[in-house]
Image (cartoon, rainbow, N blue to C red):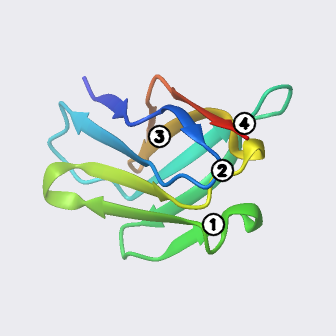
Amino acid sequence: QVQLVESGGGLVQAGGSPRLSCAASGSSSSFIAMGWYRQRPGKQRESVATIAIGGSTNYIDSVKGRFTISRDTAKNTVYLHMNGLKPEDTAVYYCMMRKVFQTYWGQGTQVTVSS
């Protein structure tokens, strides 16, 4: 059974630069994509950043130039490096890892940005 465990959230001051991590356990095959989603208060869950098996990345416009997604395929771990945090980045951040026929989600980690 694949499980994703996130870490790195918490209360951060505006302008801060935390890093979120998500490690997968229980997987014996590669993931074709990894990513980070978030759900802001009163909003729907949205894709923040994704990285495909070939290394190509995609970002939501509001985080381009501030957030960077990276991965360690040997460790089945994906990271989200967040810079220049703004109060509107406050959300529950979820990691996602996808195989051909199944998508897995982390439990979510709260990031609260204080102004």
Q: Amino acid at mark 1?
A: Tyr
What number is the disc on residue 47?
A: 2
**Local crowd at mark 3 within 10 Å, few (<14), some, or many (≥20)?**
many
In the rendering, which numbered label is found on residue 59? Answer: 1
104 vs 68, nearest the viewer: 68
Residue 55 as seen in the image, left or right of residue 110: left
x and y percentages locating residue 34 in the rendered image: 42, 53
Residue plotted at (63% across, 66% down): 59
The C terminus: image quadrant: top right
Q: Nearer the viewer, residue 66 or 58?
A: 66
Q: Position of residue 79 (x, y in %)?
A: 37, 53
Q: Find disc 3 in the rendering and name its residue.
A: 95
Whole-number angstrom distance, CA of label 3 to CA of label 2: 10 Å
Per the image, the residue denoted by label 4 is: 45
Up/down of 19 relative to 103, above or below: below
Residue placed farthest to the right in the image? 42
Indicate the position of residue 109 as horizontal and vertical percent values. 49, 28
Q: Which badge, 4 or 1, is on the more N-terminal residue?
A: 4
Q: Residue at x 47, y 40 (%)?
A: 95
Q: Considering only order in the chain, which callout, 2 or 3, is on the residue closer to the N terminus? A: 2
Q: CA distance from mark 3 to mark 1?
A: 14 Å
Q: Dot 2: what SS? A: strand
Left or right: 2 as drawn, with respect to 49: left
- Between the C-alphas of marks 4 and 2, the distance is 7 Å
The answer to whether mark 1 and mark 2 are in CB contact below 8 A is no
Amino acid type assigned to the residue bearing label 2 in the image: Ser
